[in-house]
Image: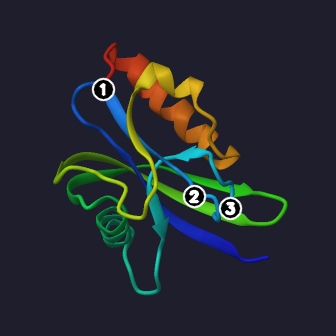
Amino acid sequence: MSRVHVAVGVIENGAGAVLISRRGASQHQAGKWEFPGGKVEAGESLPEALARELYEELGIRVLSCRALMVVDHDYVDKQVRLDVWRVTSFSGEPTGREGQAVSWVAIPALAGYVFPEANTPIVEAVMALRSTDGTDKV
């Protein structure tokens, strides 16, 4: 089984919320919420892949990002490597350009959403970052 390499963005809005999107009915882990992103293509750097995917999916341009973590996860039917980036500045208004629902969610409320298992460490990291500085900003 090959590993799918994905660039993922934890997109912050400066008001204590992060953007999540809902996986489509035909996608792996359908109906669950996730942090947006997509597959890294051959020859792309991680920031390039992240910028391309977030533009294609959401219509935003990444202005500032930095690496947050890497998550390797094995599902029964798929292996994924998630390279996760904090997106702290972007231009444009995020919309679901592929028909997916998107939502700004206050960090404490993330616990009320169902995410794919591979996203669990990301949710935990976002919540931990919040608690270390005493604010709702990631």
The residue type indicated by label 3 comes to: His
Q: In the rendering, at what x and y percent does residue 17 appear?
A: 33, 29
Which residue sits at x=75%, y=66%? 78
How far is disc 1 from disc 3 in space, using C-alphas? 30 Å
Residue 28, which numbered label?
3
- Decide if residue 47 is on the left or right side of residue 119: left
Q: Which of 53 and 63 is in front in this view?
A: 53
**Residue 107 appears in the figure:** yes
The image shows residue 15, relative to residue 93, as above or below, that is: above
- Decide if residue 1 is on the left or right side of residue 95: right
Q: Mark 2 points at which residue?
A: 24
In the picture, the quarter occupied by the N terminus is: bottom right
Q: Name the residue under label 1.
A: 137
Q: Nearer the viewer, residue 10 or 106?
A: 106
Check contact, mark 2 vs mark 3: CB within 8 A. Answer: no
How far is disc 1 from disc 2 in space, using C-alphas? 28 Å
- Which residue sits furthest top? 134
Which residue sits at x=55%, y=58%? 82
The residue type indicated by label 2 comes to: Gly
The image shows residue 48, relative to residue 66, as above or below, that is: below
**Residue 138 appears in the figure:** no
Give the label, 1 or 3, closer to the camera: 3
Q: Residues within 10 Å of mark 2 (few under 14, many from 20)?
A: some
Element assignment for label 2: loop
Which residue sits at x=20%, y=49%? 93
Residue 5, which numbered label?
none
The residue type indicated by label 1 comes to: Lys
The structure's colour scheme is rainbow
Q: In the rendering, at what x and y percent does residue 3 appear?
A: 68, 72
Q: In the rendering, at what x and y percent does residue 21 appear?
A: 46, 47
- Decide if residue 85 is on the left or right side of residue 80: left
